[in-house]
Image (spheres, helix red, strand yellow):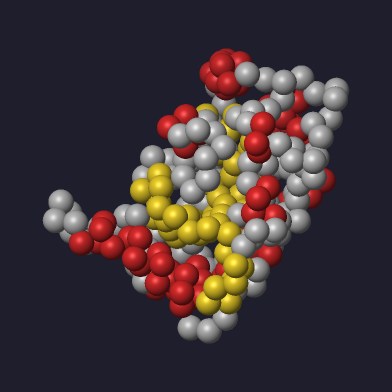
C-alpha cells in the first residue's frame, strides 16, 4: 500500500459519541480542518501532525488492536476494537479513503466522523459515516453540504451538536424538512463547554443573540417533544479531564 497521510495522533480509547459509544476504539486523528466551529475541542489538530505512510498507520492500528484480537475471553474472533477516522476533517486528505478501505479489508468495523461540509458519496460503503449537520451556534451553519443527505443509509448517523436553544429548534426543523427520522440514527449531542486550555482565538464566536441551553434542558426538551433522537454527552469528557488528549 503506497501513499501518505498527515496524522495528528493514533490511540486506543473508548468511543465517546454515536451509537457505538462506550466500545473500545482505535482513533486515527488526521491533521487539518477547513471549518472553525465555536466549540471545537481539537484545534490542536488544525496544524499539528506528522506525515506517515498508510502502511505505518495500518501497522500501528494492528498493534493497538492486538490484545483484543488475541484475548482468550473471546470465543469468536473479536470484532473489537472499532477503528475511527477523525480530525480535523479526514476527508480533506485524499488518502483517507484508501486507508478506510484497507482497514475494512482487514476486518475492522470502520467509522468516520466528518463535518458534513465535504462529499461523502465516494467513501467505501462498508464504512459507518457519522456526519454532522452544523447548527447555528457552531458559526459554520452555512457550510452544510445538504446534497450529502441523499447518500446516507441506515448504517450511517447524523449528529447535531447543540449548544443553544436555537440549535435545538434548527435541528428539529431539519428533521422535518429533510424527513430524517427513519433514515439513520439521529444524535443530539450537548456541547460540553471548552476548558480554558481548549479555547482558541481562531474559533468562530457563538452569535451573541443565541440562548445557551443546559444538558438537562436539552434532555427535557427531547422528551417533551417526543423526538426520535438519541441524546448524548461526550462521555470521554466525563471519564477523563475534558482537555486531556489521546482519550
Ligand atoms: S469540523 Fe468543527 S469541530 Fe470538527 S475538527 Fe473541524 S472545526 Fe473542529
Q: Considering only vertical position in the picture, is 138 above or below 155? A: above
Quadrant of the rendered image containing residue 140: top right
Q: Is residue 88 above or below residue 107?
A: above
Left/right placement of residue 62 relative to residue 155 reads left
Q: Residue at x 25, y 58 (%)?
A: 67
Q: Nearer the viewer, residue 165 or 37?
A: 37
Q: Position of residue 174 (x, y in %)?
A: 70, 37
Q: Is residue 178 visible?
A: no
Which residue does the image show at 46% across and 77% down from the upper left? 55
Residue 44, image x, y percentages: 65, 50
Q: Residue at x 76, y 56 (%)?
A: 34
**Residue 132 placement (x, y as % from top left):** 64, 46
Question: Is 76 in front, or is 96?
Answer: 96
Q: Considering depth in this image, is 141 or 86 the residue closer to the camera? A: 86
Position of residue 242 in the picture relative to residue 191 (left or right)? left
In percent of width and height, residue 102 lies at: 45, 74
Amino acid at each position: 500500500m503506497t501513499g501518505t497521510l498527515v496524522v495528528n495522533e493514533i490511540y486506543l480509547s473508548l468511543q465517546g459519541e454515536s451509537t457505538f459509544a462506550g466500545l473500545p476504539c482505535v482513533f486515527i486523528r488526521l491533521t487539518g480542518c477547513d471549518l472553525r466551529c465555536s466549540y471545537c475541542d481539537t484545534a490542536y489538530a488544525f496544524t499539528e501532525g506528522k506525515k506517515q505512510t498508510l502502511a505505518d498507520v495500518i501497522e500501528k492500528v494492528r498493534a493497538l488492536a492486538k490484545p483484543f484480537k488475541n484475548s482468550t475471553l473471546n470465543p469468536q474472533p473479536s470484532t473489537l476494537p472499532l477503528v475511527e477516522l477523525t480530525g480535523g476533517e479526514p476527508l480533506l486528505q485524499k488518502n483517507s479513503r484508501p486507508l478506510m478501505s484497507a482497514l475494512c479489508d482487514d476486518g475492522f468495523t470502520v467509522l468516520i466522523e466528518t463535518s458534513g461540509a465535504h462529499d461523502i458519496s465516494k467513501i467505501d460503503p462498508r464504512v459507518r459515516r457519522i456526519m454532522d449537520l452544523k447548527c447555528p451556534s457552531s458559526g459554520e451553519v452555512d457550510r452544510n453540504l445538504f446534497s450529502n443527505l441523499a447518500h446516507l443509509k441506515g448504517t450511517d448517523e447524523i449528529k447535531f451538536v447543540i449548544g443553544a436553544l436555537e440549535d435545538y429548534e434548527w435541528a428539529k426543523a431539519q428533521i422535518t424538512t429533510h424527513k430524517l427520522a427513519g433514515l439513520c440514527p439521529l444524535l443530539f449531542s450537548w456541547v460540553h463547554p471548552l476548558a480554558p486550555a481548549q479555547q482558541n482565538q481562531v474559533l468562530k464566536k457563538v452569535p451573541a443573540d443565541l440562548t445557551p441551553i443546559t444538558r438537562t434542558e436539552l434532555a427535557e426538551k427531547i422528551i417533551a417533544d417526543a423526538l426520535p433522537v438519541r441524546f448524548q454527552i461526550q462521555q470521554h469528557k466525563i471519564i477523563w479531564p475534558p482537555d486531556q488528549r489521546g482519550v
